[in-house]
Amino acid sequence: MTAPQRILVMGSGGREHALAWSLSRDPGVAEVIVAPGNPGMKDVATIRPAAASDDRMAAIAQELEVDLVVVGPEGPLVAGVADHLARRGIPVFGPGRDAARLEGSKAYCRDVAQAAGVPMAVGAAFEDDEEGAIDLSRRLGAPVVIKADGLAGGKGVTVCATLTEAEAAIRACRPRFGLAARRVVVERALSGREASVIAITDGASLLALPAARDHKRLGDDDTGPNTGGMGVYSPLPDLPDGQAAALMERFHRPILGELARRGIRYHGALYAGLMLTDDGPYLLECNVRFGDPETQALLPRLSTPLAPLLLGASNGRLARVAAAAGLAEGRIPGEGATVGVVLAAAGYPLEPRLGDPILGGDSPWAVSALTFWSGVRRSQGALVTNGGRVATIVGRGASLEEAAAAAYRASDAITFPGRQLRRDIGRVGSFAAGAGRP
Ligand SMILES: Nc1ncnc2c1ncn2[C@@H]1O[C@H](COP(=O)(O)OP(=O)(O)O)[C@@H](O)[C@H]1O
Ligand SMILES: [Mg+2]
């Protein structure tokens, strides 16, 4: 199965850098274009400005004669960019608007999961009904979880230790998140370790990637505020790669089946955020794209070329591509271990400071570590911070310990004023102590 020759990756973060890096290594791929990308990606991709609208972006993809568009972030998918591309006959990796509701509405995800028989925490969604939501939180008892229904950039969920906090979180939803909180989900709090299991699918066939785990809190030992993710590692000692496919059969496949019953075809990456509890795994949420920072740690572990798989997922030929690539058992195998350390700007996550000059950023990649840039721009020839998360430094090794050592060696070489990073990413001590507990 041949690879697509020209690929357009939409997005600008570390996930998109990792995708562009992985795709550019495929000898069958002639050019990777990233829009809008960031200047840190220039060695692996051609950088183009983003278009003013999704329809214009689709028109540009057509003018560029790309063979595949890979959509990185959830925003454009939920807005329907994949439908615009499909209408112009451009193969796109990423679901259409109907299917992207799985991430665009947590209430919709709950509804689909329930109909599919997929386990989720007891809970319910309330539309314009704060009193109903507060009432359910009282019946469930603390701790309880309050979620804005719609996209909230990873900030819409509050795990509340008390009912007073829960009531405040419910009342704060609408003012904080506006329309994204027209509905509010109230859920029983589960406890356990989290895992991200991502599958690639064309709607019929599925392939599981190895599981990964991100570290959401800003500080070491899972202290401080929640962030978009301060680090990630794979494989998980408590969820070996070989088990991801079994979880995919219990979560992803029934969800796709339920969508199909509703007349909706899903294709792209389907990400299940799982809580591994003493009663077994539960679904916390679905995302309709690759995770950030999970992708940065996962792609360097794969030796199977990604481009033909993504094209196969987009055009319904995933089973054939997988067979041609020699993949069995519904999974893409991983090799070695990776640990990704996020370098964040001063003031992140509340008010990231922009414009700090980055030193050491232009040094070549070490064999044992990769730098995936996100919030950066060029100013007078030098890289400066331009977002909360600045880069993910991914160390590789035979074990997590080796990978962590490589990641920290490389991280320490990249500095900027106010740089924040956790020191415990992927350390055996950190997951033994229960990283990922709410
Ligand atoms: N039912 C739950 N019980 C315990 N923790 C939860 C629950 N739902 C969500 N969380 C915590 O909140 C985080 C964010 O919730 P999630 O549903 O993944 O929303 P998002 O990623 O859109 O912010 C999860 O990663 C988990 O740590
Ligand atoms: Mg999540």
Image (tube, grey):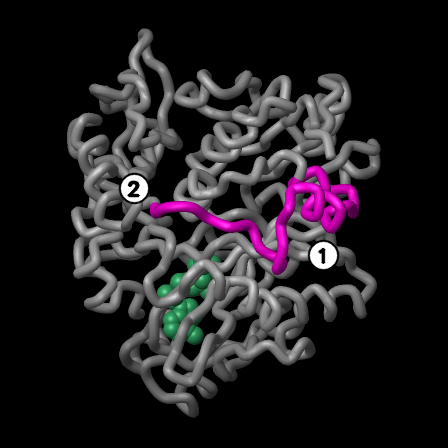
Q: Nearer the viewer, residue 155 or 323?
A: 323
The residue at the point 50 percent across, 59 percent down is 197
Residue occupying the point 31% across, 55% down: 215
Seen from the viewer's position, the closer of residues 121 and 15 is 15
Foreground residue among 96 and 198? 198
Circles 1 and 2: CB atoms closer than 8 Å:
no
Q: Which mark is residue 205?
A: 1
Q: Is residue 323 magenta?
A: yes
For the C terminus, the quadrant is bottom left
Q: Which amino acid, mark 1?
A: Ser
Q: According to the image, label 2 marks what residue?
A: 397
Q: Quadrant of the N terminus?
A: top right
For the residue pair 328 and 318, the one nearer the viewer reads as: 328
Q: In the rendering, at what x and y percent does residue 170 appear?
A: 42, 72
Is residue 170 visible in the rendered image? The answer is no
Q: Magenta stretch?
A: 309-337
Can you see residue 238?
yes
Secondary-structure class at tag 1: loop
Image point 47% across, 54% down: which residue?
210
Q: Quadrant of ligand 1?
A: bottom left
